Amino acid sequence: MTEKLSAEEAVGENLLRIEEAIQDACIRAGRRREEVTLMGVTKTVDPDRINAALRAGVRCIGENRVQEFLAKRERLELAGGEAHLIGHLQTNKVRQIVGKVTMIQSVDSLRVARAISEASQKQKGDPEAVDPVRQTGVTPVLIEVNIGGEEAKSGVAPQELEKILEEVSCLPGIQVRGLMTVPPIFDSEAEKRRVFLNMYKLFIDIRGKNRDNVSMDILSMGMSGDYIQAILEGSTMVRIGSALFGKRNYPA
Ligand SMILES: *Cc1c(COP(=O)(O)O)cnc(C)c1O
């Protein structure tokens, strides 16, 4: 069997494998499969292959860069599916992306949160905007946490989370739906699980505080190399790129 798979078949096969692994992890963790959403991460992936994933059953995609997403957006067959922004968002790009995605997962400062809130309120009633932004003038967001305390990574430090949530919860144009993280890369299972467990504890802790405008129902963690461990520790959304679409080819 050396026949080369079409791009569409390859994505379908990868999806089957990932789906099986997710189901296994859910069983091991005593969780229901419906508790975990699979996001396909589509940076550098062309619209044809993204559409293959959507046709194969992926219901949610994540893009890192505003410009790249806007360039591909018209060609995506999203239908009822969702697109989320998962990469660092600069304040000066906020107006271009609000209303074009269902959720922004990468809120890492009060400044960017304020800009999203303001832009969302302006989008209310705009026929071009996605629901729910059009209907409510509110963008659902996640706060990105730098759980490993890495210098080079964006995200709010765990000890600053309370403060930012307090301020963000007063903004009329955003609703905090949970937390997102990109943890450090670890080789050992134990270390992977330890950081994910720390995230889960933060998530549960904040959920218990019942703040206005803050409903902790999404914990977005786990990528191609660690989504099993993330599910075992309570992730509700895994963001999978290379395991689904193959190795990324970055343009030179
Ligand atoms: C690229 C990326 C992913 C997916 O990474 P893979 O290792 O290819 O699965 C997930 N989350 C974020 C924020 C990313 O930038």
Image: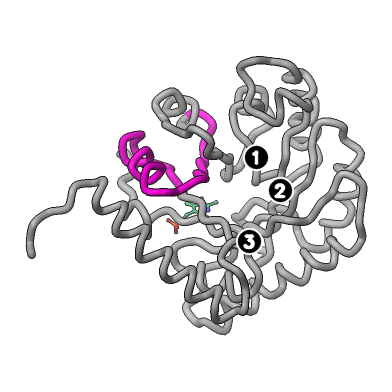
136 lies left or right of 105: right
Q: Residues within 10 Å of mark 1 (few under 14, many from 20)?
A: many
Structural distance between the alpha carbons of marks 2 and 1: 8 Å
Question: Decide: marks 1, 3 in contact (CB < 8 A)?
Answer: no
Structural distance between the alpha carbons of marks 2 and 3: 12 Å
Could you tell me residue 135's position as x and y percent? 74, 24
> For the residue labelled by badge 3, is the local secondary structure a helix, a strand or a loop?
loop
Label 1 beta carbon within 8 A of ligand 1: no
> For the residue labelled by badge 2, is the local secondary structure a helix, a strand or a loop?
strand
Q: Quadrant of the C terminus?
A: top left
Between label 2 and label 3, give the one nearer the viewer.
3
Identify residue for label 3. 236
Answer with mark 2 or mark 1, whichever residue precedes in sequence: 1
Q: Residues within 10 Å of mark 3 (few under 14, many from 20)?
A: many
Q: Amino acid at mark 3?
A: Thr
Q: Is residue 93 visible?
A: no
206 lies left or right of 56: right
Identify residue for label 1. 103
Depth order, front residue of 138/242:
138
Residue ID at (50%, 61%): 223
55 lies left or right of 230: left
> For the residue labelled by badge 1, is the local secondary structure a helix, a strand or a loop?
strand
The picture quadrant where one finds residue 243 is bottom left
Q: Residues within 10 Å of mark 2 (few under 14, many from 20)?
A: many
Q: Is residue 60 visible?
A: yes
Q: Amino acid at mark 1?
A: Met
Could you tell me residue 8's position as x and y percent? 26, 46
Q: Which mark is residue 142?
A: 2
Depth order, front residue of 191/30:
30
In the image, the segment drawn in magenta is 41-67
Query: Residue 50, relative to residue 228: is it above or below?
Result: above
Question: Decide: marks 2, 1 in contact (CB < 8 A)?
Answer: yes
